[in-house]
Each structure stands twice: as structure tokens, then as C-alpha cells.
Amino acid sequence: LQCGSSMLSKYLTLFAGQYQNIIFTTNAFSCFRGLFLSFFLMLTLLFIFSLCSIGAPFILLMPFVKGLEIGVFTSYLYQTMHLKGLFANILLLWPHQVVSAGIVIGFSLISLRSARQLFQITLGGAQGKESALIPILLRPYLVCCGINLIPIGYELLANFLFLPVFLK
């Protein structure tokens, strides 16, 4: 058991280090791409799971995965940078991640409702409503992707202003 937790710890440290390399870069385009694609992938998975009649368990896991992502990176910054890591979390990481987590939770609720409706349709509870699910889901999906551009913009600005202080 200890060997397994050691391997998990090494994997999570590697993940956090790679995430730090992508996000804490002076290249704004690389930072934007890393932040947006990470969030876009999570929302796309939620969208796909919501179109699956047995997608509800996977939808319920996504907020947990988002929380795990935030927790791993928060602890990694604190472990490697100590007090600077705490301030980096407060200024650079948490504002964007808290808003993104809220968006993931909100879209998870919408996706869960859709997966439940699709499951009821599959069981024969309602007929002819399958085609209406995609347009109903597509609008919130696109809105969530668009809304997330605001905290990503904040993180890009914060990286530009504060990153040189934390990387000294």
C-alpha cells in the first residue's frame, strides 16, 4: 500500500510540475492555451457524458477531479515555494480556479439532469425527446466556455504582473 501511495505522490508531483511549467510561463499564448484547453477538456467530457444514458456516475466525478486538480497544485506550490507559494496561490491560482470550479459544478448539474432524462428515455419513460437534448446542452456549454475567458484573462494579467516576483 505504501508503494502505491508513493507512486501516486510522484505522479501528482510530476503533474503539478508540468502544470506549473505551462501556467507559470512568460509566454501569454502558452499560458492561455494551457488554461483554456484544460478547462475545455473538462467541459467537453461533461458534455459527452451528459449525452450518455449511463454518464451520471462520470458526471458526478468531474467536480471531484477539478477539486483534486486545485488541491494538488495548491499543495505543490506551497511545498516548493513555501510562503511565496501561499501568496502565489492567493494571487495567481485561486481566483481563476474557484470561478472555474463553480462553472464545472454548474455545468455538472445541467449535464446530470440531461443524463437522467436520457436514461428515462432509454427506459421508455418519454419518447421523442432525444433530439432536443443537444441544443439544450450546447448553449450552456458554449456560455460556460465563454465565461471562463474572464478568469483566464485575470490569470494572464496576474501572471504578467506578479510572476516575476514569485520566480525570483
Image: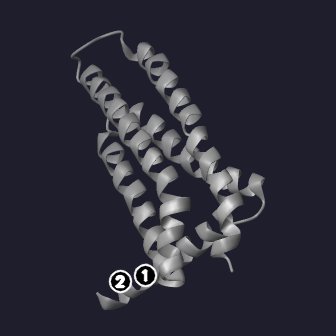
Residue 114, quarter of the rendered image: top left
Where is residue 13 drawn, in percent x and y? 51, 79
The kind of residue on which mark 1 rests is Ser
Q: Which mark is residue 104?
A: none
At 50% from the left edge and 41% from the top edge, which residue is drawn? 43
> Label 2: how many residues lie within 10 Å, few (<14), some (14-19) or many (20+)?
few
132 vs 149, nearest the viewer? 149
- Element type at mark 1: helix
78 relative position to 56: left or right:
right
Can residue 11 be seen in the rendering of this structure?
Answer: no
At 53% from the left edge and 27% from the top edge, which residue is drawn? 143
128 vs 137, nearest the viewer? 137
Q: Quadrant of the C terminus?
A: bottom right
The kind of residue on which mark 2 rests is Ser
> Label 1: how many residues lie within 10 Å, few (<14), some (14-19) or many (20+)?
few
Can residue 146 be seen in the rendering of this structure?
Answer: yes
- Element type at mark 2: helix
The residue identified by callout 1 is: 9
37 relative position to 107: left or right:
right
The residue identified by callout 2 is: 5
At 50% from the left edge and 70% from the top edge, which residue is drawn? 87
Q: Are marks 1 and 2 in contact (CB under 8 Å)?
A: yes
Q: CA distance from mark 1 to mark 2?
A: 6 Å
